[in-house]
Every structure is written in C-alpha cells, then in structure tokens.
Image: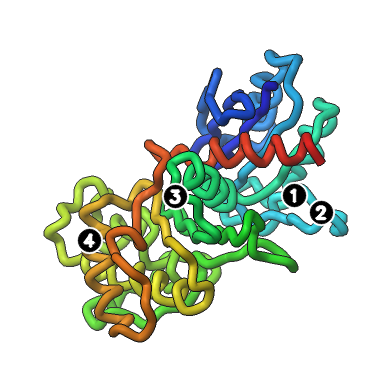
C-alpha cells in the first residue's frame, strides 16, 4: 500500500511516499515559495504515484483543523508572507480523490515519535513533542489522540519569566514579542548576537539564557500534562543544549513531582534528521484510509 506524506514547513516542503510499515520508498524536498508554486510542485510529485491510497499533511500554521469550519484545511493567520488564508487541503482535493489527513507539523512529528516508541519497544501512553527551529511549536499525544478541540495547541506562544540577563531583548514574535517562540526560535540568535545560530558556540551565555526558557516550557508541560516523555527536535536542538535544559529544569522543578531519569524524560527524537513527521504522516494517512 502506498501512502503519501507532506511535511509542509515554512522554509521547505518534504514530500514522501511510503508503506504501512512506515518505510520511505521515495522522497523529494523543495523550498517553500509562493502557495501556487509550492502546492503545484506537491501535486506534480504525487501524480507520479497513481496507486497512492491516502495522503497526510503536517503543515506549519496556524491551521484550521475543525471539520465543521468553512475554513477547514486552510492555513490561517500565519506570519509566513503570502500564506495566510490558503486552502491547502482543498487545493489537493481538486487533484486527488483520496482521503487526506490534515494536522500541524508538530502534531505530525509527535505522532511519529508515538509510533516509533512502539517500534523501539518503548510503548508510551503519552508524549509532548517540541520543535525549535525557524519557529517553535509543540504537539501532544495521549493514548493515540491529539490534544486540542477548538483548535490545535499553540505551546510555542506561552509566556515566560524573563532571564535577568535578557531583559533588554524584546523578542521577535510578531504577535506576542517575548513568548517562547519570540525568545528561543532560530532567528533570535541573529537578533541578539548578529550571528546565525550555527555560528554561536555553546559556551556563549546566550545558550544558557535559551536553556532557561526551554526549561520553563518543559516545566509547564510537565505540570499541565504529566507526559511520559518530552521530546525536543528542530535545528536549534542538540544533545549538548539539552544537557543545559535538563540542568535548568531540575532547578526549576525543585523536586515537586517525580519525572524519573531526566536523561530519559527530556530527550532528542528517535527519528534521525528530524524525520519524525514523515513517519507520523504515514501512520496518519493509514488511519485516514482505514476510516
């Protein structure tokens, strides 16, 4: 059975075809340009696979996921220029008479990690997945279902206590300024230091400041959801950075609740190269086909 995956990121799209065993059989990636050009490239790719049974799309957002909304399947008020109010699912539906599962990029990644936990004999009842890259978002899965009813979660925009050495930085979120995304997403490096994140050594104090904010997000997540695991992916995250996050988290939590071994609680993704969303999409496309 052939299943399609679209990981629609603000910087690039990754389209793939795989099977019900979550194995990638073919894939392509291309830059996110205009909606017309990018969606047409997506359509052209999947038309090469006439036996495709279903497609799952995990998209940057915000998006409309409520089936009773006239804008179901749309990207809504996104800061990505040119992409507000784009009918993503409707555009695909005009070309493909197939079930299409529609969710956020971080939900796709969260579900991929949920599936992989079973394949790696780590079956989890719940997890929360954060991505920290060009933007920040998070998805929560509990017993195989996503959290969110009126819409998808927007944990990248929670408010934080400011680090005393970072009070002059206003944050870069166009909606909230110094929310989590406004303080720790990849572009904040250049806003603070004038350098790209990959050019800022881990010895720089800015990493400690960012770890303080990410640890707060992990603390809030722990106290609100009590998940089995919190996973951090995205271009900003590395194992060395997570060591700083765990240290800050331990101090902030102060032994209030039990979370077990921090090295197994706050972790990198099981999927390599931030490929969790593709695995999740194959599983969600299969779910759409079977339902």
**Image quarter for residue 286?**
top right
Label 4 to label 1: alpha-carbon separation:
38 Å
Q: Earlier in the sequence, mark 4 or mark 1?
A: 1
The colour scheme applied to this rendered structure is rainbow
Which residue is found at the position 27% from the left and 67% from the top? Answer: 246
Q: Is 59 situated above or below 1?
A: below
Q: Earlier in the sequence, mark 3 or mark 1?
A: 1
- On screen, residue 92 versus residue 78, left or right, reads right
Which label belongs to residue 74?
1
Across and down, in percent, residue 50 comes to 75, 15
- On screen, residue 212 versus residue 175, left or right, reads left
Few, some or many residues within 10 Å of mark 4 (<14, 14–19, 20+): some
Which label belongs to residue 122?
3
Across and down, in percent, residue 223 comes to 47, 79
Quadrant location, the C terminus? top right
Few, some or many residues within 10 Å of mark 2 (<14, 14–19, 20+): some
Label 4 to label 2: alpha-carbon separation:
42 Å
Residue pointed to by mark 4: 243
Is residue 144 visible in the rendered image? The answer is: yes
Q: Earlier in the sequence, mark 3 or mark 4?
A: 3
Residue pointed to by mark 2: 71
Label 3 to label 2: alpha-carbon separation:
38 Å
Label 1 to label 2: alpha-carbon separation:
6 Å
Is residue 167 visible in the rendered image? The answer is: no
Which residue is found at the position 58% from the left and 52% from the top? Answer: 107
Quadrant location, the N terminus? top right
């Amino acid at each position: 059975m052939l299943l399609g995956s679209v990981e629609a990121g603000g910087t690039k799209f990754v389209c793939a075809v795989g099977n019900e065993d979550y194995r990638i059989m073919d894939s392509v990636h291309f830059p996110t340009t205009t909606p017309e050009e990018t969606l047409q490239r997506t359509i052209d790719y999947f038309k090469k696979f006439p036996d495709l049974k279903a497609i799952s799309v995990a998209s940057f957002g915000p998006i409309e996921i409520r089936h009773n909304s006239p804008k179901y399947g749309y990207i809504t008020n996104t800061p990505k220029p040119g992409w507000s109010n784009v009918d993503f699912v409707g555009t695909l539906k005009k070309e493909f008479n197939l079930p299409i599962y529609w969710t956020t990029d971080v939900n796709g990644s969260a579900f991929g990690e949920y599936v992989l936990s079973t394949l790696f004999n780590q079956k989890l009842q719940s997890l929360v997945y954060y991505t920290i890259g060009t933007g920040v978002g998070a998805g929560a899965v509990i017993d195989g279902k996503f959290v969110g009813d009126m819409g998808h979660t927007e944990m990248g925009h929670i408010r934080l206590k400011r680090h005393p050495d970072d009070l002059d930085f206003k944050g870069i979120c166009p909606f909230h300024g110094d929310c989590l995304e406004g303080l720790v997403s990849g572009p904040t490096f250049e806003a603070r230091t004038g350098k790209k994140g990959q050019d800022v050594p881990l010895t720089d104090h800015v990493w400690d400041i960012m770890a303080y904010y990410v640890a707060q997000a992990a603390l809030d997540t722990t106290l609100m959801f009590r998940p089995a695991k919190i996973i951090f992916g995205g271009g900003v995250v590395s194992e060395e950075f997570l060591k700083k996050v765990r240290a800050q988290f331990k101090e902030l939590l102060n032994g209030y609740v039990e979370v077990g071994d921090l090295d197994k609680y706050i972790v990198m993704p099981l999927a390599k190269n931030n490929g969790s969303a593709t695995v999740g999409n194959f599983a969600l496309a299969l779910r759409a086909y079977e339902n």
